[in-house]
Amino acid sequence: MPLKDQIGFTKNGPALASPDEVNRLREFVNLKLAARGFPIVGKESDYPFLDLGRSLIASFQEKTRLLSDYLCPADAAIDAYLHDYLGEEIIN
């Protein structure tokens, strides 16, 4: 893997991003900000991918909400064992 991709530097110093790459990175950062409920940088109309991203974010957040109390079978078995073993000593 090129050094630029690994750490953002080349043999001659910091890697300079092309304007397209800068815009793509800005859109990515804005998508992450929007996913966490923070305001984005710039105007939403400048980032068309953000509109598509919002629907994906909403879907992900709803799935996360629905599965927040779900434990996979292995975790459920461990949880049941700890509750049986520790009884009322367990701290949630």
Image: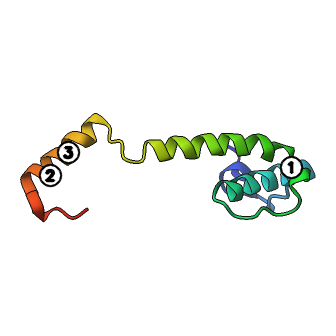
Q: Is residue 32 left or right of residue 22?
A: left
Q: CA distance from mark 3 to mark 2?
A: 6 Å
What percent of the width, then of the height, locates residue 34?
A: 71, 56
Q: Nearer the viewer, residue 15 or 39?
A: 39
Find numbered disc 1 in the image and state the secondary structure of the residue it sits on.
loop
Identify residue type, mark 1.
Tyr
Q: Nearer the viewer, residue 35 or 24?
A: 35
Q: Is residue 26 left or right of residue 73?
A: right
Q: CA distance from mark 1 to mark 2?
A: 49 Å
Q: CA distance from mark 1 to mark 3?
A: 45 Å
Answer yes or no: do the residues labelled 1 and 3 have beta carbons within 8 Å? Answer: no
According to the image, label 2 marks what residue? Answer: 82
Q: Residue at image x 70%, y 41%?
A: 55
Label 1: how many residues lie within 10 Å, few (<14), some (14-19) or many (20+)? some
What percent of the width, then of the height, locates residue 75?
A: 27, 42
What percent of the width, then of the height, locates residue 51?
A: 80, 44
Is the N terminus in the top left, top right, bottom left or bottom right quadrant?
Answer: top right
Find numbered disc 3 in the image and state the secondary structure of the residue it sits on.
helix
Going from the N terminus, do you reach mark 1 or mark 2 first? Answer: 1
Answer yes or no: do the residues labelled 3 and 2 have beta carbons within 8 Å? Answer: yes
Q: Nearer the viewer, residue 20 or 38?
A: 38
Q: Is residue 76 left or right of residue 60?
A: left
On residue 47, the disc is 1
Find numbered disc 2 in the image and state the secondary structure of the residue it sits on.
helix
Going from the N terminus, do you reach mark 1 or mark 3 first? Answer: 1
Query: As displayed, is residue 4 above or below residue 63?
Result: below
Viewer can see residue 45: yes
Q: Is residue 33 left or right of residue 80?
A: right
According to the image, label 3 marks what residue? Answer: 78
Identify residue type, mark 3.
Ile
